[in-house]
Image: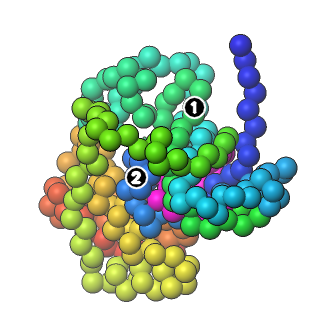
Amino acid sequence: MQHTVTPVGIIRSCFKEKFAIPRQPQLAPAARGVLELLPPFDQGDAVEGLEQVSHVWLLFLFHQALEDKPRLKVRPPRLGGNKSMGVFATRATHRPNGIGQSVVRLEGVEPGRLLLSGIDLLDGTPVLDIKPYVPYADSIAGASNQMANQAPAAIAVQWGDNALPQAREHALRLGEPLVELIEQCLAQDPRPAYQVPPAERVYGVKFWDVQVRWHYPQPEVIRVLEVVKD
Ligand code: SAM
């Protein structure tokens, strides 16, 4: 059976590239975005009642990880990228139908727009459906996953002399919690698990319209070097 799906909206996100997006929602509460609803869902009727809800499930398309050939096994970054697992045992982006799901905080509801935080979604992500989080059904006491029982350990994030004032200035300009966004995302340690970079190697990523650059002065410490407009 084949079935065609059509997006109900598109995500406008602080994340402009896949690198340094947290592996799951809620790991960076300062990660904000807007879900712009598409016709016919861009009218107030489609979101009536949602103002009573604190979180929503988003079903979306991993539009930058779509593949023609299905994989039975994947190598999740969480396991260091060198151990394979059955695709259905993981939350990897390479999936049979390219469908992802994230529970995110609903900060505001407007006709045609949902204001979101705690997202793990790339800018431009097509959203296929939106469902309210239902605490009594969606939160299961005693649930376990032996591969992912706890959030990944955070690493230390330090600021270089110029980087913090730069980040504060851009935060004011953007009206966004940019300092917190950088700290929360980099604390997840975006480098591939198998990489132990030399201290001189500089990494970078774009959040909103700024480039954030950092290095690892020690293996488990990040130092932010600069935050500059792209
Ligand atoms: N919470 C979702 C889930 O469990 O289905 C996503 C988990 S997936 C491990 C999270 C990663 O997906 C992020 O780190 C980011 O790099 C990637 N990602 C987010 N949006 C994407 C998109 N539209 N296309 C491809 N990759 C995406």
Identify the mark at residue 48; answer none if there is no mark: none
Measured Cα–Cα span from mark 1 to mark 2: 18 Å
| Nearest to the observer: residue 194 or residue 70 | 70
Magenta region: 114-127
Mark 1 neighbour class, 10 Å CA radius: few under 14, some 14 to 19, many 20 or more: some
Which residue is located at x 39 percent, y 75 percent?
179
Colour pattern of the rendering:
rainbow
Q: Residue at x 44, y 52 (%)?
A: 25
Q: Is mark 2 within 8 Å of ligand 1?
A: yes
Q: Secondary structure at mark 1?
A: loop
Q: What is the number of callouts on the image?
A: 2
Res 203 → quadrant: bottom left
At horizontal 24% and vertical 57% (from top left) the residue drawn is 154
Quarter assignment of residue 1: top right
155, 230: nearer the viewer: 155
**Is 230 or 66 nearer to us in this picture?**
66
Asked if residue 112 is among those painted magenta in the image, a careful observer would answer no
What residue is disc 1 on? 98
In the image, 191: left or right of 73? Answer: left
- Residue of label 2: 22
Q: Residues within 10 Å of mark 2 (few under 14, many from 20)?
A: many
Displayed quadrant of residue 182: bottom left
Image-based side of 99 in relation to 184, left or right: right
Q: Is residue 119 magenta?
A: yes
Say which amino acid is labelled 2.
Answer: Pro
